[in-house]
Image (cartoon, rainbow, N blue to C red):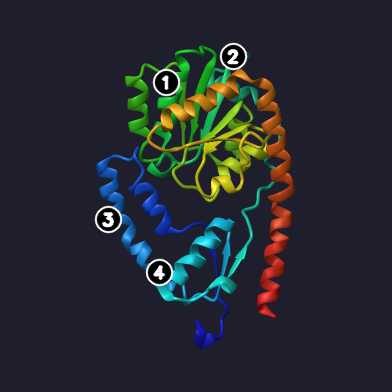
Amino acid sequence: MNKFKIKVITTAHGSVNFESRAIIFHPMVNFIEKLAHSIYYPPLIYWEIKNLPSIPYFITVTKGIKNYLTNLGIILWKKNLKNKFYHIPNGIDTKKFYPQSPDENYISLIDKNDNEIVIMFTGGLVVRKLPYLLIKSFYLLRKIFSNIKLVFVGGGRLLNYCKLLVNNLNLNDSVIFTGYVQYNEVIKFLSLADIFVLPSIYETPGMSMLEAMAMKIPIVASNLPDINEIIVNYKNGILFKNDYNAVKNLYHQLKLLINNPELRIKIANNGYNFVRTSFDINSINEKIYKLYKYLIE
């Protein structure tokens, strides 16, 4: 690259160094998965550490990533790499993701009744997103609420495991798996949601969460970096402690939200206004354009 005097700008959506430790040390990840991830991550970590000082510029989607990579440079290379990093968040197309009436065809797909509260997850059914944590918390909720339904929109290698868990907990009548869907269909399914849950071990901060907020859906998410950089607890979302007691912690927060329609409305409105103000794709694109122009000049 230097031979041709090309300026390289890398967008950092996370740090594999940080993500690997978050997964390997999480109490809800079993031994086999921890072993598999301990084999999968080292080459990626090596690449990140090796190339961190040599890349001229980084765009980081959260302040947390910016701070983490800056500190990594100081610890490993004894260099202050702060001037390499520019924080510009992910953008949401608010012309696509906005509050809209449920689509009748999709109502029939999940067999939603008028008095049902739909709890929804969209994204990959992978270890990092802990879908089985949500299933276990939902199992506790079903003991006290009969008018709730859980919908997983998306596929992944944990799909069969999640289906087996649902079957073992006798939740087949109230949990639905759509499998992989087209991108535009995500909007149709989100229009049915009353609560959106992000139980992930690590997100930066999670496009699915921002999309749900843009559609005025109240959020319950893990109180972890960099999710808690976006969510202010009980203001524009609800955070739960994702630790040894994660199942009960998530259960209690969902129970609180189900029992408080006024709180759901408040959180949904605040989240909607926050995303439109801070994450609209047009303003984000303008920031990226100005940065590229500045660096080129």
x and y percentages locating residue 144 in the rendered image: 49, 13
**Can you identify the residue that label 3 sits on?**
39
Under tag 2, what secondary structure?
A: loop
Proximity of marks 2 and 4: CB atoms separated by less than 8 Å: no
**Can you identify the residue that label 2 sits on?**
113
Q: Earlier in the sequence, mark 4 or mark 1?
A: 4
The residue depicted at 59 percent of the width and 28 percent of the height is 195
Q: Nearer the viewer, mark 3 or mark 2?
A: 3
x and y percentages locating residue 132 in the rendered image: 39, 32
Q: Hey, what amino acid is under mark 2?
A: Asn
Q: Which image quadrant is residue 245 in?
A: top left
Distance CA(mark 3)–CA(mark 1): 33 Å
Q: Hey, what amino acid is under mark 4?
A: Ile
Distance CA(mark 3)–CA(mark 2): 46 Å
Q: Hey, what amino acid is under mark 1?
A: Tyr
The residue depicted at 63 percent of the width and 32 percent of the height is 218
Under tag 4, what secondary structure?
A: helix
Disc on res. 139? 1
